[in-house]
Image (cartoon, rainbow, N blue to C red):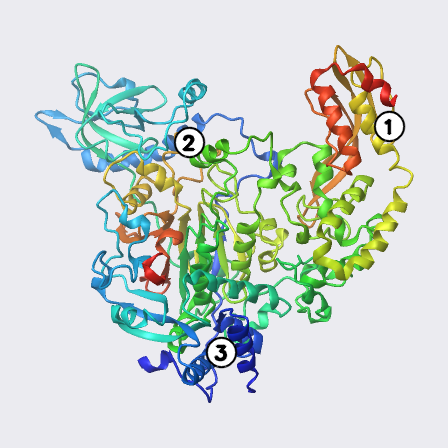
Amino acid sequence: MADSGGVVLTGAPFEEAPYLPSRNASAYKPLHTFDLPKGADKHYGQQFADMYFLRLAELKTHVKQKAEEAWSDFTLGEEQAQYVDRVLDVRQGQLCWVVGTVYMEMGLKPNVLDDIAKEHWIAAPPPRETYMSAGGQDEMMLEDESGRLRVIGDGLRSQYVTGCILAALGTEQADGTFQVIATQYADLPRQPQRWERDDSQLVESQQPPAKRATAGKLAIVSGLEIAGTADDHLSLDLLMEYLTGEAGGPPDQFQRSSITRLVVAGNSLAHASPILSREDFMAKKSGKKHYGYDASAYNASPSEHLDLFFSEILPSLPITLLPGPSDPANVALPQQPLHPALFPQSRQYANPPVKSNESRQGLDSVTNPWEGDIEGWRILGTGGQTVEDLLKYVEEVDSIEVMEMMLRWRCIAPTAPDTLWCYPFQDDDPLMVRDCPHIYFAGNQRSFQTKVIAGPVDQKVLLISVPKFSQSKMLVLLDLETLEVETVDFSVVQPGGQA
Amino acid sequence: MSDTYKDYLAARILSDGKPVTYRLLSRAEKVNTHVAKQMLYEFHSKQNAKKPNSIHATYLLTGKKRIEEHNNGVHKKDGDDTFMHSSPYMSSMPEPEEPEPDESTPSTSIVLVREEELEVTKAEFEKITSIHIYSLEPGPLQNLNVLSVCNQEVATDYLGEDPLERWRLYGSIHNPSIKRRTAKFAPPPPAGVPKAASKPAQKVVSTATSKAKDTAAPARRGSASEDNTSGRSTPQLAPAAGSLKRSDSKPNLKRDKSDIFKSFAKTKPKQKEPTPAPVEDDPMLGMSEDEGDPEDVTETKIDEEKAAASRKARAEREEKLRQMMEEDDDEEMPDAPVTEDKDSQDAPVDKAPIAQPAESETVTVQGGRRRGRRRVMKKKTVKDEDGYLVTREEAAWESFSEEEPEPKRPKPAPAKSTNTAKGKKTGKSGQGSIASFFKKA
C-alpha cells in the first residue's frame, strides 16, 4: 500500500470513499465457568475453608505426580527422599517431601481483627503497595488438613504466595522448621486443541467439519476509567473512531476491518465500585456528612458516557465487557456481569436475558474472570485485580511473571480468599485452571507486556498484560490467526506540552 | 455534491466560532467521512488563501513512530509529545520494569496534533501511513479536549438515524452480523433531544426477535414515550404514560428500604426515562413497577415540573394525563396528609391505632417508642418463562418500631415538608411538646 493512499489532503473535486470490506463475524463461544448462582441460591454464609480444601484435594494428585517424577530417586548422602502424606507426620532429620497449601504470614497483610480494633482509634492506614514487612519477619507455612509446617528456604518468599499448592522437599530442623531444598508445582494443565469445542459439537451432530474463514483480530483494551471529566473524552473519541474505522486514511481503515471483536477488560468506569476504595472513602468522609445514601451526590454522566461510547462502536464491532475492580459490579471474585440497565442504549445490541447463553454478535456483558472460545482459541481473561493483589506479596516481579505462575499453579486467584474478596465456593472452585487457555490476558496492568510460555506437554500460552487505557492510551491487537500481538497508541499533542 | 458544506462550515466556524470535526461535518452534510475530510481540507485551504490564518486545523496522523522515540526523554522539543511518552504512570513507576512495549511488538501510533506542531510531530514518525484533517476551528486551540464536544453533538443531534445503516452513509466499517434488538422500550436519547421525537416509528428495523408477539408498536429512542402509551395494556398505567417510569423508584424508597432501590431513586436525571415498563408481565429486571399508585402520581407531578424545560412539546399531553391521574386518586389522596400528620404528631400520645386507608397501619406508642403494624407493598421477584425477572407487588403486613424510621414521604409539596420537619423533631426526642399535639388533633 502506497503511503500516498493514506494522505487525505486534497480538496475538490472530492473523490469518493474507497471500498471498505465488511467485518467478518467473530467466532465467539463464551463459557460460563464463572457465573454464580442467581438470587437466593447465592449463599455468603459459608466458610472459606472449603475452598482451600477443594484446592488441595484437586491439585494434590497433580503436584504429587510432578514431585514423584522429579524426586523419586533423589538422594542426599545415603538417604532416599520419602513422601510424607501429612505435613504433621514429618519427622525431624528425615529427608522427605510433602504437599500442602502455602500460607504467608506477613506483617502488613490486612487483618480483619486489626482493622476492627484500630478503626476506632486511628485513621485508616494508607493504601498498601505491598504486604511485605520491612524487617523481613514474614513467615511462610505449608498447611494441609492436618496442620501447619513452618518452612524456610532461599528465595521461597519471592516465589510463592498464600493459596498456591506446592510440594516441598527438605528436612525438618531442630527448631521445628522445615528447611526446603526444592519445590514443585502442578504446572500447566491439559490444553484443548484449537476449535476443539466446535469440532466435537460438529462430530456429535454428525456434520462435516466446518470451513473456517481466516480469523481476524481481537482488540483488547482495559481501564477506560471514565470519570465524567471532559479530559478523557478526546482520547476515547479517537479510540472509538479508530475502532469504527472512521478515522485515518483508506489503507489504515482497510486494515482495521480485520478487527472482529473488542474486549474491554475491566475498569470501564472510575470510582464506581460499590465499596469505596480507601482514598475514595477518605475523600467522601471529609466531605459533607450525610446519613445513608446521598442521591444528590450521584453523577450519572460517566455511565452515560460509557453507554454512548459502546453504542457508537457496537453497530460496527461486537464487544465483550468484563467488569473490573472499579466497576459497579459485585466486588467479590468472580465479578458478575455488569447489569444491562447501565447501558440503556448499548443493551439493544445485547442478547435478551433468556438467550444470554447464545453466542451473540453484539454487546456481551460477562464475568470477571472470563473464559471463552474466540476463533477456536481458549481465552482466559481477568480485570487484573488477581495479579494486582498477588504482586503485593512479592518483590521485583512483573505482572507477566505473576500471570505465568498463576497458570502453572493452576489457580488464577491463589490469594483469594485470603487478601482478595471472593465468593465462598463450596463444591467447586472455578478459579482453578482446568483447561489450559491459549491466551491469558489481565487488564489494568502497569505496562504492556507479552510472553509465550510453554508447558510440559507442548502447551503454549500467550500471556498479555494490558495496560490501563486511561494512562497508557494503548489498545492491544491480537491476530487470531498467527497469535501475533501489536499495539496501537493514541495521543494528543497538547499545546505547550500539557497533557 | 453541493457547496452547502461551505455555508455550514462558514456559519459554524467563522460565525459561531465553534470547532468542527470531520465526523460532525459528515453527519451534518450526510456525506462519507472520507469526503468530509476532503471538505475540511478544501475549506481550510480556500479560506486561508483568502485570508491567512483565518482558519486553524488539527491533523490526525497514523503511522509508526521511530523506535528511539519510544524511549523517554529524547524528545526533540520538550513537551511536544509528553502526552504519549511520559504518561504519568510510566514515568513514576517505582520498579525498574521495562515501561515500553517490547521492541518486537509492532506498534501503531495515532496522534492528534495542531497545525503548529504538525511538522515537529511528523518528524517523530518513521513512517506515516495516513494523515488527514481532524478538525477545523477559528483559532489555535489552547486545549484540544474541546474537540470532544463535536462528538457529543454527533451523538445527540443525529440520533434518529439507524445506527446499523451508518456504514452506508458515513463509511464506518460494516459488520453484517450485528443485530439490534427492536427496542420495544427504547430509552430516550441521552440528552434532551426533542428533534429526535419526530422520527417516524416505522423506520424501525424489522429485526423483531422473540418479542414479536407483543403487538405494541416497537418504539425507538425518541419516539419512545409516545409509543409506550399506546403499547401499554394495563389500564391503570395508561394515565401515567411515559412519565410514570421516572417516579418508579421513589415509592420503593418508602416501602422497602433496600439499598439497591434507594440507589436508583435519584440516580437518573429527569430526561432519562429508563426502559419503560414492558407491556404485560415481563418488566425489565426490577427497574419497573406495574402499579400506578397514588404516591406515584404526586411524585410524577413534582418531577414533571422540574423537567418542564426539556419537554415543552409534550406539556399539553402531560397536562391531560396529569388531570386523569388526579381523578384516579381522588378518593385516596386526601388521606395522605392525614397519615403524615398523625405519624409525626401523634407520636407522644398514648394510643393511636388508627387504620389508614392509604397505608393502613396500627400504631401503639409506649414509653416514647412507636410500635405497630402496617400494611406495606412487598416486592416479590420471580422468573417467568421467558427468563425475565418479574417484580410483583403484594400487600403484606409488617411490624415496625421506632428504630425503623418512618417511611419517608419523598419530599412532597412544601406545605407538607414543614410537617415532616416538625415530625422529625418530635420523633427524635420521643417527647414532643404538648402544644404540637393540640395544634392539629
Instruction: Name the residue carrying label 2.
Output: A417
Where is residue A496 drawn, in percent x and y?
Answer: 33, 60
Report crowding for label 2: few under 14, some 14 to 19, many 20 or more residues within 10 A (C-alpha).
many
Judge by depth and name the residue closer to the eye, B366 or A261.
B366
Where is residue A74 drawn, in percent x and y?
Answer: 14, 32
Q: Amino acid at mark 2?
A: Pro
Instruction: Name the residue carrying label 1.
Output: B356
Instruction: Name the residue carrying label 3.
Output: B36
> In the figure, is residue A231 to the left or right of A76?
right
Quadrant of the frame with the C terminus of chain A: bottom left
Q: Amino acid at mark 3?
A: Ala
Query: In the picture shown, does residue A469 fall above or below A482?
Result: above
Where is residue A214 drawn, in percent x and y?
Answer: 40, 70
Q: Residue at x 81, y 41 (%)?
A: B293
Q: CA distance from mark 3 to mark 2?
A: 55 Å
Report crowding for label 3: few under 14, some 14 to 19, many 20 or more residues within 10 A (C-alpha).
many
Mark 3 vs mark 2, foreground winner is 3
Element marked by disc 2: loop
> In the figure, is residue A44 to the left or right of A236?
right
Q: Residue at x 48, y 32 (%)?
A: A286
Q: CA distance from mark 2 to mark 1?
A: 50 Å
Q: CA distance from mark 3 to mark 1?
A: 67 Å
- Chain containing the residue with disc 2: A
Judge by depth and name the residue closer to the eye, A358 or A237.
A237
Mark 3 vs mark 1, foreground winner is 3
Mark 2 vs mark 1, foreground winner is 1
The answer to whether residue B282 is visible is: no
